[in-house]
Amino acid sequence: MAQDAAALRLVPGNRDRRMKLALAYYKGQKITEAAEQSAFLLQEDPKNARVAMLLGDCYGAIRLLFVNTLSGLVREYSGDLGGAQEAFRRAIAQKPDDFEAHLRLGSVLYQLRKLDEAQTQLELALQIDVASSWARFELAALYFKLKRPEDGAREKQIVDRITAEECQKKTKSGVISPQLPSR
């Protein structure tokens, strides 16, 4: 797939290759990438029914993924941890690299005291987004619960560093003010 994607950047008009790439992405559960390729093809040929159907399938899969993740969140917040666990697992089955689903499943498993499974899910979330302070915070709490204070302290230090860097970026960009407003 990487070769096809690189070739398409050089020769953007190659429809057959782009369609093969879109189908390969779809079959490989890379739904967003498949949708992007399909949308590009549909712009070039709006009457292509095959491309329109593939794009529809992609949007349906994206909607289903969103529904599963949203269902998991609603169930988690309403206290239905078993239902939340099932919904997040469905979201992960639909899209294995879904950061939010891995993170939330890890949190739910932590609450259910399934600590080894929670650790696996939180570590998977971090593999997807290594800069996530939230996943690292959850993992730090889990390590402390597992009586692994060195690992917990290490993750907490990383969270503190990431948080400080984010605050510094926002202060420099003017998103937040370094001074409190006067009364």
Image (spheres, rainbow, N blue to C red):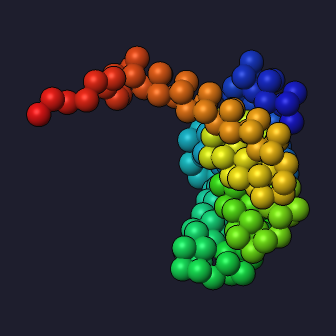
Compared with 83, 36 (above or below) is: above
Residue found at x 34% / y 29%:
176
Quarter of the figure with residue 132: top right
Instruction: Mark yes or no: residue 175 visible.
Output: yes
* Viewer-closest of 4 and 102: 102
Instruction: Mark yes or no: residue 105 visible.
Output: no
Looking at the image, residue 25 sits to the left or right of residue 135; the answer is right
* Viewer-closest of 19 and 94: 94
Compared with 61, 168 (above or below) is: above
Give x and y (percent) for residue 67. 60, 70
Residue found at x 54% / y 27%:
164
Task: Report the number of numbered marks.
Answer: 0
**On the rendered image, what quadrant is the N terminus found in?**
top right
Residue found at x 72% / y 22%:
9
Compared with 11, 74 (above or below) is: below
Give x and y (percent) for residue 98. 71, 53
Looking at the image, residue 158 sits to the left or right of residue 17; the answer is left
* Viewer-closest of 113 and 21: 113
Compared with 134, 87 (above or below) is: below
* The residue positioned farthest toward the left in the image shown: 183
Give x and y (percent) for residue 157. 68, 32
**On the rendered image, what quadrant is the C terminus found in?**
top left
Give x and y (percent) for residue 101. 69, 59
Residue found at x 70% / y 43%:
136
